[in-house]
Amino acid sequence: MKVIYTDSLVIGGGLAGLRVAIASRQRGFDTIVLSLIPAKRSHSAAAQGGMQASLGACIKGEGDDEDVHFADTVKGSDWGCDQDVARMFVNTSPKAIRQLSAWGVPWSRVRGGDREVVINGEKVTITEKQDAQGLITARDFGGTKKWRTCFTSDGTGHTMLYAMDNKAIQMGIPVHERKEAIALIHEGGLCYGAVVRDLITGELAAYVAKATTIATGGYGRLYAVTTNAIISEGIGNAIALETGIAALGNMEAVQFHPTAIVPVGILTTEGCRGDGGLLLDKDGYRFMPDYEPDKKELASRDVVSRRMTEHMRKGKGVSSRYGDHLWLDITLLGRKHIEKNLREVKEICEYFLGIDPVKEYIPVRPTQHYSMGGIRTNATGESPTLKGLFSAGEAACWDMHGFNRLGGNSVAETVVAGMIVGEFVSDYCAANSLNVSTATIEHFINQEKKKITDLLMRNQGENPFELKAEMQKIMMDKVGIFRNGQDLEKAVEELKVLNQRAREIALRNRISSSNPELVEAIRVPKMIKLAQCVAYGALLRTESRGAHAREDYPERNDRDWLKRTLTTWKDEGSDLPEVKYEDLDVMKMEMPPGSRGYGVDNTIHHPDTKKRISQIETIKEANPGADRYELQELLNPTMIPEKFKGRNERIGRGFK
Amino acid sequence: MNDQERILKFHIFRYNPQKKGDKPRMVTYEVTEAPGMTIFIALNEIREQQDPSIQFDFVCRAGICGSCAMVVNGSPTLACRTLTSKYESGEIKLLPLPGFELIGDLSVNTGKFMRAMSERVESWIHDQYADEVNFDKLEERMDPEVADQIYELERCVECGCCVSACATKRMRPDFLSAVGFMRLARFALDPRDKRTNEEFYEIMGDDDGVFGCMTLLGCEDYCPKDLPHQTQIAYLRRKMAFVR
Ligand SMILES: Cc1cc2nc3c(=O)[nH]c(=O)nc-3n(C[C@H](O)[C@H](O)[C@H](O)COP(=O)(O)OP(=O)(O)OC[C@H]3O[C@@H](n4cnc5c(N)ncnc54)[C@H](O)[C@@H]3O)c2cc1C
Ligand code: SF4
Ligand code: SF4
Ligand code: FES
């Protein structure tokens, strides 16, 4: 039996995982990072748009601060987020970006003086302040009041991940590549590490640790088409679920982006439509004005995605061997504009579609993009039910995104959560000693060994690739952008059947070392369970909130549904997860539920909302001299680690 | 879009060193071409429908992460963004990237090589104060031009195409290679990195470093990110020539 000991085991070498490992090492703990692939190839590298932090250096960001960022984030979440966590996040994000700057990210900088930008389809000139010259600049993004999204040209995630991994290499942090965590080791409500399979040799080893952090990214690949990397399969979430103790939060909260190319699902930026591009159907007809006479193609992401789907369901999609799609037409923008301002879109079209978007339409359809749900944690990043298990990044439901995350808030979350959760992981390592018996470790290894042997021995059975494709199709067709009771019920039933069938997988290639079919056979049953959590959670939630849109329950229902879904899988033999709910306490909210200011406002209000609003008024009146920091402390005290408590400086404003 | 269907012939290098008695060989698979088909799509179709044991590495499948470099009809390139329609004959020969440890079939261990490269060139900002930066305060300013220039050199995705295309690397196993030079050039340009020319010389001032390069520029020809290898190698050489 191969056993490797460490203090802080981190599963996942993306931005979140690497940052937790760095925090652990900074505090003097031994740490090991596990990754399916070389860390620098993690999906964090694909983020192009940017990272939100309220630095307020560019002119369109003037007046920005933590409070504005907080309000945008809470509204974006459709009040589904944990406001303590959102607070910790917005206060720490400026520090995160400045630290990354010292570690080597070449953030794009403010150039003082005039520059031409396109706002609302029109060219306008804005004048950057000379005294902001050389500070980190920001661009505009959806759902934000200020220009707050910091970036490095069109490669933000790439430069962030490279700087982070370089820092980890500098600190001598080992990254064990081509390793897959396939089960957690736990006993008596405490987590002690993971059973890990070597993807080259097939060898199983136990990585035993005081604290285990899951930072494995999203579960986009539950869907047939997604903008996510092909390794975003949610295995980290699944192994937490399979403990029967740790809970997953809000798994039904899944975000869709309107324009990814068909068939491969690679994202084309919102800028295409922002600059005047149109959506057309199979008859070349521009359909959006019929649905949204006001905003047309430029309604919010979730609205456009829903309308496109509706239109395709009416048979207006263009059929192709890869399923139906619609057209994105940017030909009307002309060559000069496309080659200058949409260079990247042009390259994607050339490489992946072999077309020239200057002359041809781009095949697009709404596509799964982000997983708001994940391993439910406290504000410290620790599972409330399985001690010693932490989670950070897209894998976690730390819950700063609620039912919809804002663009640019995700890479920001990975780094900020890495910093904050990393401190709590270190505290945990300092306070606990490792106390696990060899028998327990052996039990978990043997359990996994047996599963693999069974797979290799079975003569006849199900094909894992087929099961996966069936699952992905169910999720696409019935648990997509638009949801309704009937389809969801069917999805839940069909997934139950798949779950049963997944117990009978047999392989054609029956070797235990590097074997892609075996990898699939290990993952697919786990993925089906996750799909069941998403589908079942979506069926039970009879309201619409953020990205969760029920045709049969179109209103946001704060009265009955201001709560977080918690899913557990207690009995390995059962064919459905258990679902419970955790109330969000309106009386503790810094920002009580209200209107988002976009989309339809059809909210059924919570009885406490009015009470809390007047309570906040009373608190404000009783403290007339309080500044924004003191007020926030009164309304929403947070548990930010000491290191990150300082106020953030801004140009022209100091520390106010 | 071209809707005409044709049968593609993939000739693929197969060898699994983990499997006792396995021998390197070429195997041919037939795939019906679809509009917009990439080598990524075709290989997955082969794995799912014909041979589940075939190994290859894709992650982002969008030309971003650098996982999928392989030799396609003689040229090292990113397979995920290579359309099958590019090959008129319909015959596509796939070999693993040379110069790296073979994991199996088309999968090679570029990760191990790149980590070693990063350690060798000390691919991080050398500034004793970087860890003591007060991140509550305004960040250190940087010339916007310089920030953009650093980004241009940091676009390398560690795919390894340049390494596999380098004749010097074939003769000198410890040759740092273009990817290493590019990384050094990136840090040499960065005002935040306080390393001196002498310190850089220690890393690359020999025949396994920049003086071993024969400037045949296979690296520049095959770099999928079109990085300016020629100018950067020349820049490093000039910089090093001044040291001794
Ligand atoms: C196309 C695209 C564009 C985006 N653009 C933006 C943007 O502009 N701004 C923004 O804020 N967000 C953006 N996002 C979202 C953001 O990029 C991700 O949410 C974020 O990077 C996730 O980081 P992470 O560290 O949580 O996980 P990842 O970066 O996905 O890393 C996961 C890690 O876990 C490892 N792993 C997984 N499973 C296992 C296992 N079982 N065992 C061992 N290791 C495992 C993997 O190897 C990997 O190292 C974008 C997302 C996509 C898909
Ligand atoms: S110029 Fe030639 S020898 Fe030098 S690194 Fe590039 S390929 Fe190798
Ligand atoms: S320099 Fe170019 S070819 Fe070489 S690893 Fe980087 S991206 Fe690949
Ligand atoms: S799979 Fe990422 S570059 Fe090809």
Image: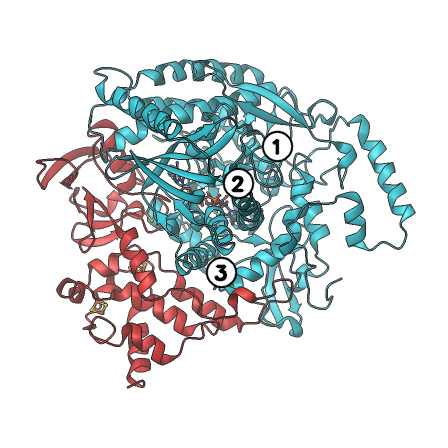
Chain colours: A cyan, B red
Labels 3 and 1 touching (C-beta < 8 A)? no
Mark number displayed over residue A153: 3
Side of A24 relative to B208 (left or right)? right
State the CA–CA distance, disc 3 to disc 1.
35 Å
Q: Position of residue A541 (x, y in %)?
A: 62, 22
Residue A49: numbered disc: none
Task: Say which element carries label 1.
Answer: helix
Q: Quick check: marks 3 and 2 in contact, CB under 8 Å? A: no
Q: Which of the two discs, 3 and 2, labels the residue nearer the N terminus? A: 3
Nearer the observer: mark 3 or 1; the answer is 3
Q: Quadrant of residue A580?
A: top right
Q: Which mark is residue A432?
A: 2
Residue B151 occupies which quadrant of the picture? Answer: bottom left
Q: Position of residue B114 (x, y in %)?
A: 30, 57
The answer to whether marks 3 and 1 sit on the same chain is: yes
Q: Quadrant of the C terminus of chain B?
A: bottom left
Q: Mark 1 or mark 3, which is nearer the start of the sequence?
A: 3
Q: Amino acid at mark 3?
A: Ser
Residue A274, x across and y down, in percent: 57, 49
